[in-house]
Image: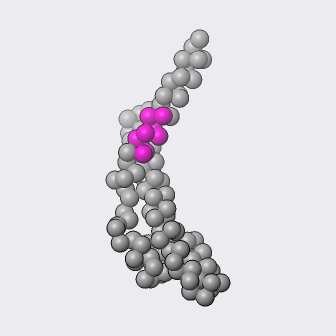
Amino acid sequence: MEIEQRRRNLVTEAQADKAEVELLTDTFNESTGLTWLWSMMFGPMYFWVHGFIGRGFLLLAICVVTLGFGILLAPFLAYPGWKKRAQRKASNMTTISKARRGE
C-alpha cells in the first residue's frame, strides 16, 4: 500500500513540475512579433548571433541547395528554436526552485 501511495505522489509531483514549466515557458520566450522578418532578412547570421548555431548551419545548407529560396524556411526554424530555449530555461528554473526548497 505504501508503494502505491509513493507512486501516486511521484506522478502528482511530476505533473505539477510539468505544469509549472508550461506556465514559465511564456515568461522566458524571447521571440518577438518580428522574429520572422529578422530571420528572413539576416538568414543564418540571425541564428548564429542568437546562439542557434545548428539551425544557422542547417539554414545555410538549405539555402545553398535551393539557390536561396530556403530562406523562406527561416521563420519555421526560428520560432521553435525560441520556444525550445524558453522551455529549457523554465525547466532549469523549476529544478533550481526545487533544490532551494530542499525537495
31 w.r.t. 95: above or below: below
Q: Residue furthest top?
A: 1
Left or right for 52, reference 26: right
In the rendered image, the quadrant that contains the C terminus is top left
73 vs 10, nearest the viewer: 73
Colouring rule applied to residues: one colour
Residue visible at 53% across and 74% down in the picture: 73
How many marks the image carries: the answer is 0
> Which of the two residues, 100 or 37, is positioned nearer the viewer here?
37
Q: Let me know if residue 46 is in the magenta part.
A: no
Give coordinates of residue 21: x percent, y percent.
43, 45
Q: Is residue 60 visible?
A: no
Relative to the observer, which residue lies in front, 2 or 16? 16
Most frequent secondary structure within the magenta stretch:
helix
Q: Picture coordinates of residue 69 (x, y %)? A: 56, 83
Image quarter where the N terminus lies is top right
Q: Residue at x 43, y 56 (%)?
A: 86
Q: Which residues are magenta?
A: 15-22
Residue at horizontal 57 percent and vertical 14 percent from the top? 2
Magenta stretch encompasses residue 18: yes
Residue at position x 40%, y 77% in the image: 38
Q: Residue placed farthest to the bottom in the image?
A: 67
Q: Position of residue 19 (x, y in %)?
A: 43, 39
Observer able to see residue 21 = yes
Instruction: Indicate the position of residue 15 as horizontal and vertical percent values.
Output: 48, 34
Q: Is residue 42 above or below residue 55?
A: below
99 versus 90 height, above or below: above
